[in-house]
Image (cartoon, rainbow, N blue to C red):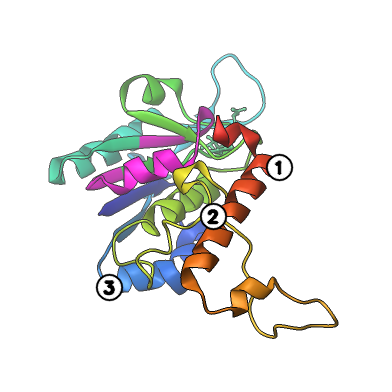
């Protein structure tokens, strides 16, 4: 899979791809992530990528020209399955969307900044708009990093234990069961004895019951 992320401030994202699971996924060539600086596609000498909003009002708006130039350049090199704009008014990100996107070959993620982007980009140049929650960030970079992380960890081979993503929350519409590690006794706080029983079938059953119970109490909407 290849993810191209277009941004006015790509540096904001480098650390999230430079460590731990994502770093390993990239090093093992399970995914290619390209951080593209929108400024590289600015047409004038000042490398301008934003301008005042027509009609007035506070806040700069990312211009359509550099974005279009960048997308044209990318599309001349390969076909994209999705061109996603991160936006607080987009469809709310969930595990189902992540699963879908993890099966794509090439995607573009476009990050807005400042007041947003010229609406004509949204009308004509993108295929999908995704929000990571009902709050407003200063830019789409952190949102793009969130989306990429949630998608990349689903790619085959990225997690050490192949089954590990499957037992995470939201797969099968269930929340994950509680987990514990050593020591088994800490300041008189013990752990459920079944986890020490060595009976894997019983442990699986217990975990499933815990998942159900947790989902019922915390997110009954998922069980509908
Ligand atoms: N004026 C816009 C917000 C602009 S915030 C509005 O009120 O809707 C600047 C950029 O941050 C946006 O263009 C978008 O790319 C990104 N962004 C902000 N909040 C986001 C969210 N919840 N999900 C995804 N992207 C978000």
Q: Decide if residue 18 is in sight here.
A: no
Disc number lying in front (1 or 2)? 2
In the rendered structure, the answer to whether residue 120 lies left or right of residue 53 reads left
Q: Report the Cα–Cα distance between label 1 and label 2.
A: 14 Å
Q: Residues within 10 Å of mark 1 (few under 14, many from 20)?
A: few
Judging depth in this view, the residue of 139 and 183 nearest the camera is: 183
Residue at point 38% right, 63% down? 163
Name the spot of residue 81 as percent of width and height, x first. Answer: 24, 38
Name the spot of residue 45 as percent of width and height, x first. Answer: 37, 45
Disc number lying in front (3 or 1)? 1
Which of pointers 1 and 2 lies earlier in the amino acid sequence? 2
Which mark, residue 28? 3
Judging depth in this view, the residue of 158 and 199 nearest the camera is: 199
Residue at point 33% right, 41% down? 100
Disc number lying in front (3 or 2)? 2
Judging depth in this view, the residue of 50 and 203 nearest the camera is: 203
Q: What SS does tag 3 mark?
A: loop
Which mark, residue 217? 1
Q: Report the Cα–Cα distance between label 3 and label 1.
A: 40 Å
Q: Decide if residue 143 is in sight here.
A: yes
Q: Report the Cα–Cα distance between label 3 and label 2.
A: 33 Å
Discs 1, 2 touching: Cβ within 8 Å:
no
Which of pointers 3 and 2 lies earlier in the amino acid sequence? 3
Name the spot of residue 115 as percent of width and height, x first. Answer: 58, 31
Discs 3, 1 touching: Cβ within 8 Å:
no
Residue carrying label 2:
208
Residue at point 54% right, 46% down? 174
Q: Is residue 131 above or below residue 187?
A: above
The magenta segment: 84-107
Judging depth in this view, the residue of 44 and 42 nearest the camera is: 42
| Quarter of the figure with the C terminus | top right
Is 87 included in the stretch rendered in magenta? yes
């Amino acid at each position: 899979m290849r993810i191209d992320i277009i941004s006015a401030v790509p540096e904001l994202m480098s650390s999230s791809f430079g460590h731990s699971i994502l770093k390993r996924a990239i090093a093992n060539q399970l995914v290619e992530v390209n951080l593209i600086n929108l400024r590289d596609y600015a047409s004038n000498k000042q490398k301008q990528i934003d301008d005042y909003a027509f009609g007035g009002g506070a806040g700069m708006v990312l211009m359509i020209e550099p974005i279009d130039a960048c997308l044209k350049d990318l599309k001349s090199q390969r076909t994209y399955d999705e061109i996603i704009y991160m936006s607080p008014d987009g469809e709310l990100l969930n595990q189902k969307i992540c699963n879908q996107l993890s099966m794509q070959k090439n995607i573009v993620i476009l990050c807005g900044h400042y007041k947003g982007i010229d609406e004509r980009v949204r009308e004509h140049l993108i295929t999908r708009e995704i929000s990571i929650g009902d709050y407003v960030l200063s830019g789409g970079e952190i949102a793009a990093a969130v989306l990429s992380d949630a998608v990349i960890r689903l790619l085959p081979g990225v997690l050490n234990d192949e089954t590990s993503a499957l037992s995470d929350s939201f797969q099968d519409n269930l929340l994950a069961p509680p987990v514990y590690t050593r020591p088994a006794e800490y300041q008189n706080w013990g752990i459920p004895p079944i986890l020490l029983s060595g009976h894997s079938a019983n442990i699986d059953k217990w975990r499933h019951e815990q998942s159900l119970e947790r989902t019922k109490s915390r997110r009954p909407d998922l069980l509908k």
